[in-house]
Image (spheres, rainbow, N blue to C red):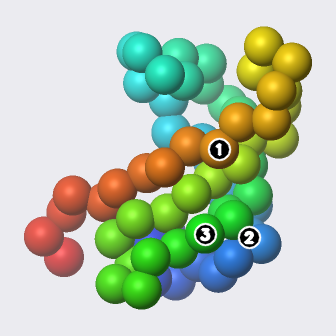
Amino acid sequence: MLVKEIKIGDTVNVPADGKFHPERGHRGKLVWKSEDGKSVAIQCERNHNGKKTVFLVKNNSKK
């Protein structure tokens, strides 16, 4: 799904990486999107260490 196609409030997959969010399969709600559509903030549906967590994700593609 392209970043420009999603809207605030949509449920999306939280990207997994080896450092900040190693667990795969989590879903979250889009809570912020930049004006150019290249960056988004996703609030994970699960608590991490007892806290709500928001992940900032940048799209590096040239498209």
Mark 3 Cα-neighbour bin, 10 Å: few <14, some 14–19, many ≥20: some
C-alpha distance separating marks 2 and 3? 10 Å
Mark 2 Cα-neighbour bin, 10 Å: few <14, some 14–19, many ≥20: few
Q: Position of residue 36 (x, y in %)?
A: 34, 84
- Residue at 69%, 76% (x, y): give it: 8
Query: Is 35 positioned to the left or the right of 14 in the image?
Result: left
**Could you say whether the residue bearing mark 1 is in a helix, strand or loop?**
strand
Q: Position of residue 60 (x, y in %)?
A: 21, 58
Q: Check disc 1 and give the amino acid type.
A: Val
Give whichever of discs 3 and 1 has the lower sequence position.
Answer: 3
- Residue at 51%, 39% (x, y): give it: 15
C-alpha distance separating marks 3 and 1? 10 Å
Q: Check disc 2 and give the amino acid type.
A: Asp
Name above or below for residue 10 compared with residue 26: below
C-alpha distance separating marks 2 and 1? 14 Å
Q: Check disc 3 and give the amino acid type.
A: Trp
- Residue at 75%, 58% (x, y): give it: 29
Residue found farthest to the left: 62
Name above or below for residue 62 compared with residue 5: above
Mark 1, residue position: 54
Image quarter in which the C terminus is found: bottom left
Q: Position of residue 43 (x, y in %)?
A: 71, 48
Residue found farthest to the front: 51
Looking at the rendered image, the disc whose residue lies closer to the viewer, 2 or 1, is: 1
Give whichever of discs 2 and 3 has the lower sequence position.
Answer: 2
Mark 2, residue position: 10
- Residue at 49%, 49% (x, y): give it: 56
Visible residue check, residue 28:
yes
Mark 3, residue position: 32
Query: Is 54 positioned to the left or the right of 2 in the image?
Result: right
Mark 1 Cα-neighbour bin, 10 Å: few <14, some 14–19, many ≥20: some
